[in-house]
Amino acid sequence: MDYKTAGVDIEAGYKSVELMKGYVKETMRPEVLGSLGGFSGAFSLKDIKNMDDPVLLSGTDGCGTKVKVAFVMDKHDTIGIDAVAMCVNDVACAGGEPLFFLDYIACGKNYPEKIASIVKGVAEGCKMSECALVGGETAEHPGLMEEDEYDLAGFSVGVVDKKDLIDGHEIAEGDALVGIASSGVHSNGFSLVRKVFDMTKESLNTYYDELGKTLGEALIEPTRIYVKAMKAIKKAGVRVKGCSHITGGGFYENVPRMLPEGANAVIKLDSFDKPPIFGMIQKNGKIEDKMMYNTFNMGLGMVLAVDKKDVEATMKAIEEAGEKAFLVGHIEKGEKGVTLC
């Protein structure tokens, strides 16, 4: 009896590391110390000494059951972008710059090429957010997970000068709400999506005119990363007063998280584009409007609160960063919460 007989292939683990090294190297920043393969990732904090009062930020998340779509489609090179996005967008939401990222892959069996493909996506997400992939872990769980299954999660650390921290306390009546477009479902609501559609190759490979692509292509579209857009807004001299990353819980849970007491966010539902995938989900699943907006992002990946005089500069910065922006509403006095109308 040996470890391989028990279901854990150490040699496959070594091969996975070798295959992913090239992708990881592409994410390096000057602050990264040491080389890949150490017991911990080292990152110099020398540069943040220039801040008046540096504050570390952290975010951790996974891709949820979106990985099931990747399993059926046998497409694993973008799901890592989702894992990075879910973490770094939370850091950016507080006004921070993501510095580094670590991933954790749990699998039933280590197939080196598949693991390397997953990490390729993680590395791509890190490059998009300009943070370094300083380490990770691949854990083989025979008997706990099916051989062809895996789960993916990550953890990001960022930094912000305390004076630039976005915490919502400055939000006031009359402030404008600017939304940044999503690319589709992102990484939340897939437990419901998987009840609405058959998760088979035939179903996911079906082309729909209203989508302009197959169902699978629409569902696996990676989560947008908004780090560059947030940096561009800051560079434009705009003070973002509040920021909400629209993830699990949709509008009703996430928008109030950025609000102070006595502030109500009013969002006009006809003010932004809804990707057609949401119409298909709602129609096929016979889902009520409120449940849709309580589950999905519905086309907005982030909602920002800014002074109304800064709307034009904010939207210009977002669009110059490659994203699409909408003026979606405003802040009123009232009970803390969100009103969709």
Image (tube, grey):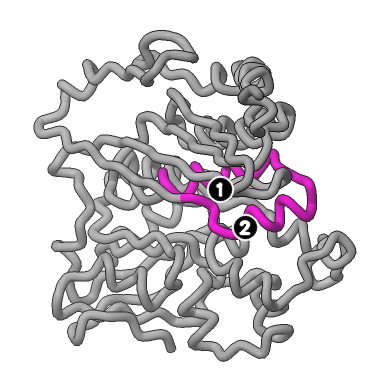
Q: Residue at x 36, y 36 (%)?
A: 98
Magenta-colored segment: predominant secondary structure: helix
Residue type at mark 1 is: Asp
Residue situated in front as seen by the camera: 339 or 117:
117
**Mark 2 Cα-neighbour bin, 10 Å: few <14, some 14–19, many ≥20:** many
Q: Decide whether residue 83 is among the magenta residues.
A: yes
Q: How many marks are shown on the rendered structure? A: 2
Image location of residue 270, percent across then percent down: 53, 82
- Please say whether residue 270 is visible from this viewpoint: no
Q: Does the residue at mark 1 contact the one at mark 2 (Cβ under 8 Å)? A: yes
Image location of residue 64, percent across then percent down: 54, 57
Looking at this view, name the residue that lies furthest to the left: 52
- Please say whether residue 296 is visible from this viewpoint: yes
Q: Residue at x 20, y 78 (%)?
A: 263
Q: Which mark is residue 66?
A: 2
Residue type at mark 2 is: Lys
Q: Decide whether residue 129 is among the magenta residues.
A: no
Looking at this view, name the residue that lies furthest to the top: 34
The image quadrant where one finds the N terminus is: top right
Q: Is residue 173 left or right of residue 21?
A: left
Closer to the observer: label 1 or label 2? 2
SS state under label 1: helix
SS state under label 2: helix
Give the vertical position of 265 relative to 315 (above or below).
Answer: below
Image location of residue 156, percent across then percent down: 38, 38
Can you identify the residue that label 1 sits on?
A: 82
Image location of residue 191, percent across then percent down: 59, 69
Q: Quadrant of residue 306?
A: bottom left
Start and end of the magenta stretch? 62-88
Q: Quadrant of residue 199?
A: bottom right
Give the vertical position of 112 relative to 237 (above or below).
Answer: above
**Mark 1 Cα-neighbour bin, 10 Å: few <14, some 14–19, many ≥20:** many
